[in-house]
Image (cartoon, rainbow, N blue to C red):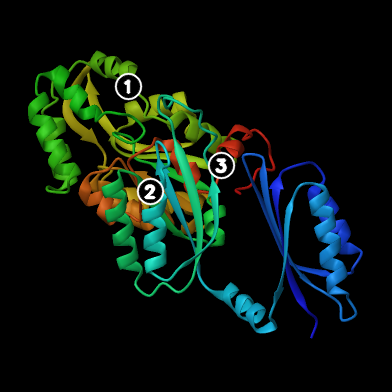
C-alpha cells in the first residue's frame, strides 16, 4: 500500500507559500488527501496530508519540503501516518456534524475554555474554529461591539436534550449566547425570514405606547406582560387591551409611529438579507398601521397584522377581522413558504413572546430574540446578547461577507 505523510508548516505568512509548497509536492507526483491552512495575525499554519507513489523517496521528499520551508523561515514537520490510522480518520467523516456559535460583546479565554469543556465532556471533536466577527481594536470596546466564534464539531451525540440544556445553562452563566445547529444543507440555504414586530423589530410594545396616550397605560402593560409570558390567552388579552383604547384619536397612532425605535441590528440584517436574495415578512400580533410603517422604512416584503378599527378619526376599541395570534402566525408562515415555493426548513422565524412559539417551532430555524424565559427555554435558538444582525452569524456569514453583501456570488464561509 502507498505511504501517507502529514506535512505541516508554520511561520510568518508571505505571498506564494502555498504555491511553492504544492509545486515541490508536484515534483514527487503525490496525491493530496487533505489540505488546510489558517492565518492568525500574519502567522500561517498549514497542513497537507499526502499519499506518495510506491517508488517515492520519502527522505528526499521530506528534505525538499524542509529546504523550501527553512529558506522562508518556516518550521516544517513531516510525520508518517499509518494506513489503519488513516482508515479510521476516513470512517469518521460519516459522523454527524454540528455548528456551535458563540455570540458576545467580546470573546474571552474563560468563555472558550468552558464551551470547549462541554464539547469534550459529550465526546464531540472540534474540527475547526472560525472567527466570524471583525477585528476588534485594543482598548475600550466600541459601542455595541459584537464578537462571534463558530465551532465545527463532529461525533455521535447520544443525549441531544442534555447537551442543549448544558449549553443553555452555560450561556446564562457566562452572559453570552450559544447557538447549536446541525451542519446540513438547509443551514446555508434559508430563503425567508419572518419577524414578530413588537419587542423584536422595534424596541416597544406599540399597544402599550398607545395605552399610555389613552391614559390606561398601567392596565394594558400588565395584561401585555402576562400575555407575553404565556399566562393568559393572547386573543382574549388582545381584545381586552384594544377595548381599553376606545376613543383614542387617530393622530396618536402617527405620533407613536414617528417615535418608534428600531431594534439594534435590524436595519443591517434586513438590508443584507435583501441583497442576498432573501424574502422578509412581519407576522405580528400588533397593528397593520405600524407594520406598514416598518415595511416602508425597512423594505419588508410581506406584512400580516391586526387591523385596528377607526371611525371618524377615533379608535372604536374593536379589531377588524380575525386576530393574528400564535396559531395564525404559524399558518401564515406555512402559507408564505408555499407561495415562495420553498421548504419550511428554509424558513427562519424570529420572535420574543409566547404567541411566537408556534411559528418558531414550525420554521426550520426558530430564534427567540431577547425573549421571555418561557420562550428562551422552548425555542431552538436564542439571542439575547447582541442585536438582530447576529442572526447572520447563525447562517455562517462573517462580517467580511456582510460588508460585501452587494456582490451576487456571496456564500457563507
Q: Is residue 283 visible?
A: yes
Tell me the element at label 2.
helix
Which quarter of the image is occupied by the N terminus? bottom right
Residue, disc 3? 398
Residue, disc 2? 111
Q: Nearer the viewer, residue 363 or 321?
A: 363
Q: Nearer the viewer, residue 211 or 364?
A: 364
Tell me the element at label 1.
loop
Q: Earlier in the sequence, mark 3 or mark 1?
A: 1
**Residue at horizontal 14 percent and vertical 44 percent from the top:** 236
Is 203 left, or right, of 292 in this rendering? left
> Could you tell me residue 299's position as x and y percent?
49, 29
- Spatial distance from mark 3 to mark 2, Cα to Cα? 20 Å
Q: Is residue 153 above or below residue 19?
A: below
Q: Residues within 10 Å of mark 1 (few under 14, many from 20)?
A: some
Residue, disc 1? 260
Q: Is residue 267 above or below residue 333?
A: above
Q: Earlier in the sequence, mark 3 or mark 2?
A: 2
Q: Residues within 10 Å of mark 3 (few under 14, many from 20)?
A: many
> Could you tell me residue 66's position as x and y percent?
80, 59
Query: Residue 106 lies in what quarter of the image?
Result: top left
- Spatial distance from mark 1 to mark 2, Cα to Cα? 35 Å
Q: Nearer the viewer, residue 4 or 361?
A: 4
Q: Is residue 341 visible?
A: no
Amino acid at each position: 500500500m502507498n505511504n501517507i505523510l502529514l506535512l505541516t508548516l508554520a511561520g510568518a505568512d508571505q505571498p506564494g507559500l502555498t504555491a511553492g509548497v504544492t509545486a515541490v509536492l508536484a515534483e514527487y507526483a503525490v496525491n493530496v488527501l487533505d489540505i488546510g491552512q489558517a492565518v492568525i495575525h500574519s502567522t500561517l499554519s498549514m497542513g497537507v496530508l499526502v499519499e506518495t507513489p510506491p517508488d517515492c523517496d520519502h527522505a528526499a521528499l521530506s528534505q525538499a519540503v524542509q529546504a523550501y520551508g527553512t529558506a522562508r523561515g518556516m518550521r516544517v514537520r513531516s510525520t508518517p501516518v499509518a494506513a489503519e490510522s488513516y482508515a479510521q480518520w476516513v470512517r469518521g467523516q460519516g459522523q454527524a456534524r454540528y455548528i456551535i456559535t458563540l455570540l458576545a460583546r467580546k470573546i474571552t479565554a474563560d468563555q472558550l475554555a468552558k464551551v470547549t469543556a462541554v464539547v469534550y465532556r459529550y465526546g464531540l471533536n472540534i474540527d475547526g474554529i472560525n472567527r466570524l466577527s471583525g477585528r476588534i481594536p485594543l482598548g475600550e470596546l466600541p459601542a455595541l461591539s459584537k464578537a462571534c466564534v463558530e465551532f465545527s464539531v463532529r461525533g455521535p451525540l447520544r443525549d441531544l436534550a442534555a447537551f442543549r440544556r448544558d449549553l443553555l445553562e452555560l450561556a446564562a452563566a457566562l452572559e453570552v449566547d450559544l447557538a447549536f445547529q446541525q451542519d446540513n444543507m438547509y443551514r446555508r440555504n434559508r430563503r425567508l425570514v419572518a419577524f414578530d414586530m413588537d419587542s423584536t423589530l422595534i424596541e416597544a410594545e406599540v399597544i402599550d405606547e398607545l395605552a399610555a396616550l389613552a391614559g390606561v397605560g398601567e392596565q394594558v402593560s400588565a395584561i401585555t406582560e402576562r400575555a407575553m409570558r404565556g399566562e393568559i390567552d393572547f386573543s382574549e388579552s388582545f381584545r381586552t387591551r384594544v377595548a381599553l383604547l376606545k376613543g383614542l384619536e387617530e393622530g396618536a397612532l402617527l405620533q407613536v409611529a414617528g417615535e418608534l425605535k428600531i431594534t439594534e441590528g435590524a436595519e443591517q440584517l434586513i438590508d443584507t438579507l435583501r441583497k442576498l436574495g432573501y424574502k422578509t415578512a412581519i407576522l405580528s400580533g400588533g397593528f397593520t398601521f405600524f407594520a406598514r410603517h416598518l415595511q416602508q422604512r425597512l423594505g419588508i416584503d410581506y406584512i400580516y397584522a391586526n387591523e385596528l378599527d377607526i371611525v371618524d378619526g377615533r379608535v372604536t376599541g374593536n379589531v377588524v377581522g380575525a386576530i393574528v395570534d400564535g396559531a395564525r402566525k404559524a399558518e401564515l408562515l406555512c402559507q408564505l413558504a408555499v407561495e415562495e415555493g420553498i421548504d419550511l426548513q428554509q424558513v427562519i422565524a424570529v420572535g420574543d413572546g409566547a404567541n411566537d412559539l408556534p411559528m418558531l417551532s414550525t420554521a426550520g430555524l426558530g430564534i427567540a430574540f431577547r425573549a421571555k424565559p418561557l420562550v428562551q427555554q422552548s425555542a431552538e435558538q436564542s439571542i439575547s446578547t447582541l442585536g438582530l444582525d447576529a442572526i447572520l452569524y447563525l447562517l455562517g456569514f462573517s462580517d467580511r461577507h456582510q460588508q460585501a453583501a452587494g456582490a451576487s456570488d456571496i456564500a457563507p464561509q
